[in-house]
Image (spheres, coloured by chain):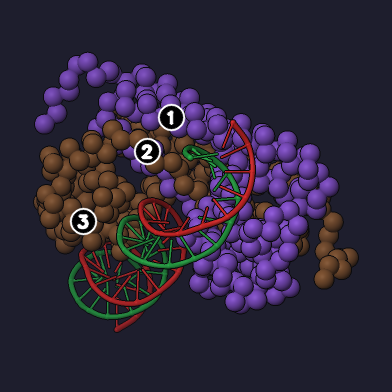
Chain colours: A brown, B purple, C green, D red
Amino acid sequence: MSRSRTQFAILALVRIQPMSGYEIREFCRTRLRHFWNESFGQIYPTLTQLAADGLVRPAERADNPRATYYELTEPGRASLREWLARAASPRMVRDELLLKLFCGDEATPAVLLEHVTVARQQAQAELDSLSEASRELEMYAHDHPDNPYWQLMLRAGRLGFEARLQWCAEAEAVIAARPGPDKETTRG
Amino acid sequence: MSRSRTQFAILALVRIQPMSGYEIREFCRTRLRHFWNESFGQIYPTLTQLAADGLVRPAERADNPRATYYELTEPGRASLREWLARAASPRMVRDELLLKLFCGDEATPAVLLEHVTVARQQAQAELDSLSEASRELEMYAHDHPDNPYWQLMLRAGRLGFEARLQWCAEAEAVIAARPGPDKETTRG
DNA sequence: CTAGACATGTAAGGAGTTACATGATTGC
DNA sequence: GCAATCATGTAACTCCTTACATGTCTAG
């Protein structure tokens, strides 16, 4: 049970090809960014534990002998499949922007507008990077058996960020329609 | 700095009206569910700390003398405003369903389909509860100065879950199109 | 009289991030 | 030579959930 979700994230990654801890981190940071994250502090200890448990093992890879690469073992594959069969724990979202908006009347419209604009730009940047990732997948993994699922994964990101973008536009309109901060509200 | 985001979530809630720890929990569990959560283990110690720091204080409330209600103090309001002015930390999402899909070819389509169907039903249930919440807000808080922001908050949930629903439908189609599990894939 | 909601709290532990420490290699 | 990237790890800490412990009140 320990290392719970991290463990399976790592197994899922080394299943594709042998990977080093550093590569696992980079993969999360770039490809899985919109729905998963793992940091070094989780990855390296978990990798050590997985190797001790025989679920992964050190592997050769021609391209760069500097790093320690790990590959999936058959027990590791069995463990991965067992996890796949279990129900997924519900999606967790923590959105500080919405929490701030929740007491929006306590702030000035200008401040809220700034927060939303930043969020809109971030969503747009994510959409751009998803498009790029989708093009890369089509080029390099067109025939990979996992490709339909990888495209679905990107599609989830795209739909999510499009919704976010739409919301930001609506929020900007609503906030802009509020009375400005020029007349001081005598509150206290 | 300690109790960081929990602290401000609580300040944001007691700002609306004096609340007990239990009510704060219920509010998160029901109204803020789609973007925020706090558990008892966080709420009670934080409430104690906030009271010690003078950011909230015990308050009277006619409707139920059993619980200890807390209200926002002026220093508490100042602290809330200061937090509101700071940039929101990026939205965090952790989606185990997508992680499973990421190695979808390792599972049977039937298993994946089941996971997605559960997710679709959950999204639909969330949409229903948001509609209900929106109707309630219009009825009881139509003239509340925060109402536009609360509606925006619900709108974010609605757009998000609609996107989720859309994605689930697409995912079901893609998975259903995959070769069935009747012919055993000789893999190992 | 009992199940369920209301109510408050603590303890333990799991999960996850950040900062630190270290060092090799590569490109400029 | 220097900065950036690649690479591995640890320690401290925050954050958060879960399980436990306890008790009241209300509705059936």
Q: Which residue is mark 2?
A: A88
Q: Tag on residue B118?
A: 1
Please state which of residues B80 and B160 is positioned toward the viewer in this rendering: B80
> Mark 2 and mark 3: span between their CA atoms?
22 Å
The answer for which chain carries disc 3 is: A
**Label 1 sits on what residue type?**
Val
Please state which of residues A35 and C14 is positioned toward the viewer in this rendering: C14
Do the residues indicated by labels 3 and 1 lie within the same chain of the protein? Answer: no
> Mark 1 and mark 2: span between their CA atoms?
9 Å
Give the percent coordinates (x, y) of residue B65.
69, 59
Q: Which residue is mark 3?
A: A47
Q: Could one spot residue A136 in this view of the protein?
A: no
Task: Point out the residue furthest to the top here.
Answer: B182
Quarter assignment of residue B9: bottom right
Q: Residue at x 18, y 52 (%)?
A: A50
**Label 2 sits on what residue type?**
Ala
Please, what secondary structure does the residue beneath circle 3 have? helix
Q: Is residue B49 above or below residue B149?
A: below
Q: Residue at x 85, y 56 (%)?
A: A179
Q: Is residue B57 left or right of residue A127?
A: right
Please, what secondary structure does the residue beneath circle 1 have? helix
Give the percent coordinates (x, y) of residue B53.
61, 77
Do the residues indicated by labels 2 and 3 lie within the same chain of the protein? Answer: yes
Q: Residues within 10 Å of mark 1 (few under 14, many from 20)?
A: some
Give the percent coordinates (x, y) of residue A125.
53, 50
**Label 3 sits on what residue type?**
Leu
